[in-house]
Each structure stands twice: as C-alpha cells, then as structure tokens.
Image (cartoon, rainbow, N blue to C red):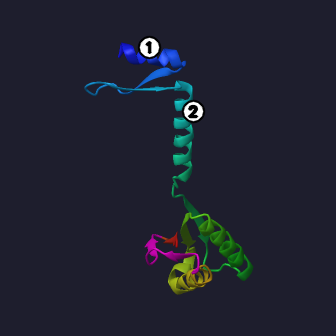
Amino acid sequence: MLEALRLAREEGLDLVLIAPNASPPVAKIADHGKLKYEKSKHDKEMRKSQRVSVLKEIKLTPKIGDHDLEVRVKKVRELLEKKNKIKLTMFFRGREMVHKELGLAVIDRLLEKVQDLGAAESKGKFEGRRLVLLIVPK
C-alpha cells in the first residue's frame, strides 16, 4: 500500500480505493477529480435514458361538439407521441346516464383517430357517473 502511494505521488496522481473491503484492498492510480467527473457524466447519462411513465388525463362529455373532439384528439396524439399514458374520463350528468351508448360512441370515434399511436389498455370502466379508459402508447 505504501509503495502504491509512493508511485502515485511520483506521477502526480492520486491513489483511489476501488474496493476497500476486499482482501487485499483494490486501489487504482488515477486523477481523482477526473474519475469523479466521469462518474457524474455517466450518472447523468443514465438518468437521461430513464423514462418515467406519466399519466395525463383528458376529460370529455357525451355531448361534446365535433370541433371540441378534434381539439381533444390533437392533444391525445401529442401526448402519445411523447410516450405518455392517457386517462380518458367521460362525465355523465343527469339523464345522460340513461344513454351510455352515446358516450361510448364518442370514445370509439376518438380511439379510431389515434389508433396509429396508441391503443386502449382495456374496455372502459364505469366509476359512478364517470367512464374511465386508459390509452397506452404503442
């Protein structure tokens, strides 16, 4: 160990412990600042390559107009291109609950327009007065 420390000082470098708990301890003669810099760059690159799945919510009603639906479709396509999951929530008010098929038809129209970028994870589920559907990117 002392000989390694002497060699490191002669070269103007540091003696860096790689595995201090090993028997015998593993050390490396290197520039400590450079090693820290390379490790931080590597860690930053690894964080950049990680993709955290984000869930975004889009709200609809069964009586949505054609233009409003197109705006929602555009937003859904934009989110799917960014690889986000989308939670479609259809709200039913008052007597709209009697005509659930109208809400399902609106959702089918929306899904048809975004089928090249994503697909429904499962059939829509009713939670009280809401119909909830999850769209995942392809």
Judging by the rendered image, the residue that carries numbered circle 1 is 6
**N-terminal label among 2 and 1:** 1
In the displayed structure, would residue 13 be above or below residue 106?
above
Q: Quadrant of the N terminus?
A: top left
Residue 127 painted magenta: yes
Circles 2 and 1: CB distance less than 8 Å? no
In the displayed structure, would residue 19 be above or below residue 59?
above
Q: What's the amino acid at mark 2?
A: Tyr
Judging by the rendered image, the residue that carries numbered circle 2 is 37
Q: Secondary structure at mark 2?
A: helix
Q: Secondary structure at mark 1?
A: helix
Real-space Cα separation, disc 2 to disc 1, in angstroms: 24 Å
**Magenta range:** 115-128
- Choose between 111 and 69: the one closer to the eye: 111
Residue 87, position in %: x, y? 53, 67
**Crowdedness near tag 1: few (<14), some (14–19) or many (≥20) residues, C-alpha within 10 Å:** few
Which residue is rendered at x = 52% and y = 86% of the image? Answer: 101
In the displayed structure, would residue 18 be above or below residue 45?
above
- Choose between 113 and 12: the one closer to the eye: 12
In this rendering, the count of numbered labels is 2
- Choose between 4 and 130: the one closer to the eye: 4
- Choose between 121 and 88: the one closer to the eye: 121
**Crowdedness near tag 2: few (<14), some (14–19) or many (≥20) residues, C-alpha within 10 Å:** few
Residue 14, position in %: x, y? 49, 20
